[in-house]
């Protein structure tokens, strides 16, 4: 008697084959019965010897591939016309053995010898770690084979877990939402979309959810770029229909789909179409969907409105740059596994001077730790100031001491506005030009990048570029505007002195 988990897997394999094969081909597969299924072998019963021989010769590779797509396991397919092709359970050794990457192995003491040909099919595993369980199959094993700490798509970063995610005022809402999803996938906040600027921890938080789900659920993590590339390969394949069916089944028969950087789908109409249908299939089946994006959905360009509406259907949470306290906590967390001791004065120095994102914060710390290890010197405040001088110019503010806050304050005072009004999302004429002017001045007298300037206003780099050029065009049309700008620049420079 098969375990329910085995029956469920075989049913999914049948559904996969039904969508992949033609009606005539599926006639040969549909009568097959699964007599035994382990991590390395699937034993099938055919109604006649002729049927068994035909299936073994022509369809065993397709069956093995289907099992691989559904479970992530590499299997040997054995087809027999015997009534029971599975090895007797009474002789199982219960021995746990290591196998190829990503394979859950059930070792038996002996195997039956099928009358028909046995076809060995090896499908290269996409994952890196191994897992073993003892025979016979335990009733506590989920319906899908467990794939510990890895996904069918791209692997998860081992450090991207909830335990290593530092929560502060800038990300507490997003972190709590992510934990809620990990405890009740498909029901709490579906889909979940995490957005924010570069290097603020979107991928870390997304992968932390995946890490928490992997023990009990079938999870796919993939970047939008990889999803698009895989889709293109399927549409350009010679066996296009079979490849596309496999692609659809890969992403629609999962418990959780995690797609990173969905802004990449801009202008990718074919990928958007496929994602739309994949979303509907998963959402209707109460499966969890998680996205990350570098901006709010409303600011996405060249994305179909029907797809945008689905992105916004669940919960959208944003990540902001960390405050001083959170930056200190992040640095101390990163130092926990280091042999180098960094004094609090250096942590204070870094936290006060890096205001862009967590990635830059870690980059600065990496440099100072590397210096201590390679030169074999204890880090002092003076050494840190000397070694990090150049980095601080790019990660905090220019050597002139001018900040975005100073620029916005000067512009706001000139137009009789408040800094918050200029930073708000309003696009009225009375607000839009002062905001663009602040962006233009920032490019003129600071070393901030367009990405950093846009991020300060909650926009992307393209908005900052457009604002800068808009002011330049206005100056060209009315040279008197240059006098106003130079006056504002002098005001800002006086603030920094």
Image (spheres, rainbow, N blue to C red):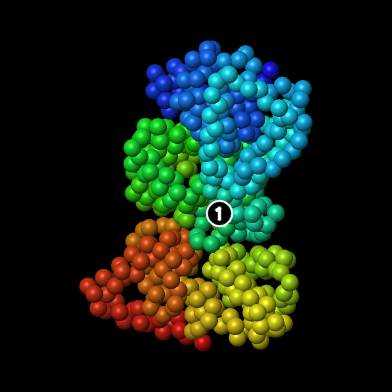
Quadrant location of residue 187? top right
| Residue 327 placement, left or right of 12 | right
* Residue 331 showing in the rendered view: yes
Identified at 73% across, 72% down, the residue is 339
Q: Looking at the image, is 82 positioned above or below residue 402?
A: above
Q: How crowded is mark 1: few (under 14 residues within 10 Å), some or many (20 or more)?
A: many
**Is label 1 in a helix, a strand or a loop?**
helix
Quadrant location of residue 233? top left
Could you say where residue 475 lies in the image, as x and y percent from the top left? 27, 75
* Residue 422 showing in the rendered view: no
Identified at 45% across, 81% down, the residue is 492
- Residue to which mark 1 is pinned: 203
| Residue 467 placement, left or right of 293 | left
| Quadrant into which the N terminus falls | top right
Q: Looking at the image, is 395 positioned above or below residue 316?
A: below
Could you say where residue 377 lies in the image, as x and y percent from the top left? 70, 83
Could you say where residue 379 lies in the image, as x and y percent from the top left? 70, 81
Q: Give whichever of 94, 256 is nearer the camera.
A: 94
Could you say where residue 346 lies in the image, as x and y percent from the top left? 68, 78
């Amino acid at each position: 008697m098969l375990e329910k988990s085995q029956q469920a897997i075989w049913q999914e394999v049948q559904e996969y084959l039904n969508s992949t094969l033609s009606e005539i081909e599926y006639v040969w597969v549909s009568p097959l019965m699964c007599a035994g299924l382990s991590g390395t072998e699937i034993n099938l019963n055919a109604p006649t010897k002729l049927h068994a021989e035909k299936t073994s010769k022509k369809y065993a590779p397709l069956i093995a591939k289907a099992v691989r797509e559904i479970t992530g396991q590499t299997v040997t397919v054995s087809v027999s016309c015997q009534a029971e092709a599975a090895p007797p359970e009474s002789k199982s050794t219960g021995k746990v053995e290591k196998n190829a990457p990503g394979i859950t192995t059930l070792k038996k003491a002996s195997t039956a010898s099928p009358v028909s040909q046995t076809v060995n099919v090896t499908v290269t595993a996409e994952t890196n770690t191994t897992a073993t369980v003892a025979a016979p199959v335990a009733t506590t094993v989920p319906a899908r084979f467990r794939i510990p700490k890895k996904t069918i798509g791209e692997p998860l970063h081992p450090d991207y877990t909830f335990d290593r995610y530092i929560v502060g005022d800038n990300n507490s809402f997003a972190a709590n939402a992510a934990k809620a999803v990990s405890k009740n996938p498909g029901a709490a906040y579906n889909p979940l979309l995490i957005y924010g600027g570069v290097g603020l921890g979107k991928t870390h938080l997304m992968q932390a959810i995946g890490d928490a789900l992997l023990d009990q659920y079938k999870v796919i993590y993939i970047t939008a770029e990889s999803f698009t590339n895989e889709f293109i390969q399927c549409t350009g394949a010679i066996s296009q229909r079979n490849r596309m069916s496999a692609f659809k089944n890969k992403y629609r028969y999962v418990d959780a789909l995690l797609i990173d950087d969905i802004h990449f789908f801009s202008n990718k109409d074919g990928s958007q179409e496929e994602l739309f249908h994949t979303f509907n299939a998963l959402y209707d089946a109460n499966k969890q969907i998680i996205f990350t994006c570098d901006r709010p959905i409303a600011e996405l360009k060249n994305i179909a409105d029907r797809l945008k509406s689905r992105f916004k259907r669940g919960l959208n949470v944003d990540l902001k740059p960390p405050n001083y306290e959170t930056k200190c906590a992040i640095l101390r967390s990163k130092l926990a596994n280091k042999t180098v001791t960094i004094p609090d004065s250096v942590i204070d120095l870094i936290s006060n001077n890096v205001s862009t994102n967590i990635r830059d914060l870690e980059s600065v710390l990496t440099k100072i730790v590397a210096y201590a290890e390679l030169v074999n010197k204890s880090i002092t405040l003076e050494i840190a100031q000397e070694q990090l001088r150049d980095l601080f110019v790019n990660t905090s503010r220019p050597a002139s001491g001018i900040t975005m806050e100073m620029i916005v304050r000067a512009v706001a005072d000139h137009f009789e506005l408040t800094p918050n009004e200029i930073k708000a999302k309003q696009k009225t004429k009375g607000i839009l030009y002062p905001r663009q002017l602040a962006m233009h001045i920032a490019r003129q007298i600071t070393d901030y990048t367009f990405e950093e300037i846009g991020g300060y206003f909650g926009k992307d780099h393209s908005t900052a570029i457009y604002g800068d050029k808009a002011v330049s065009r206005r100056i060209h049309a009315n040279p008197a505007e240059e006098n106003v700008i130079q006056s504002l620049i002098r005001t800002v420079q006086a603030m920094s002195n």
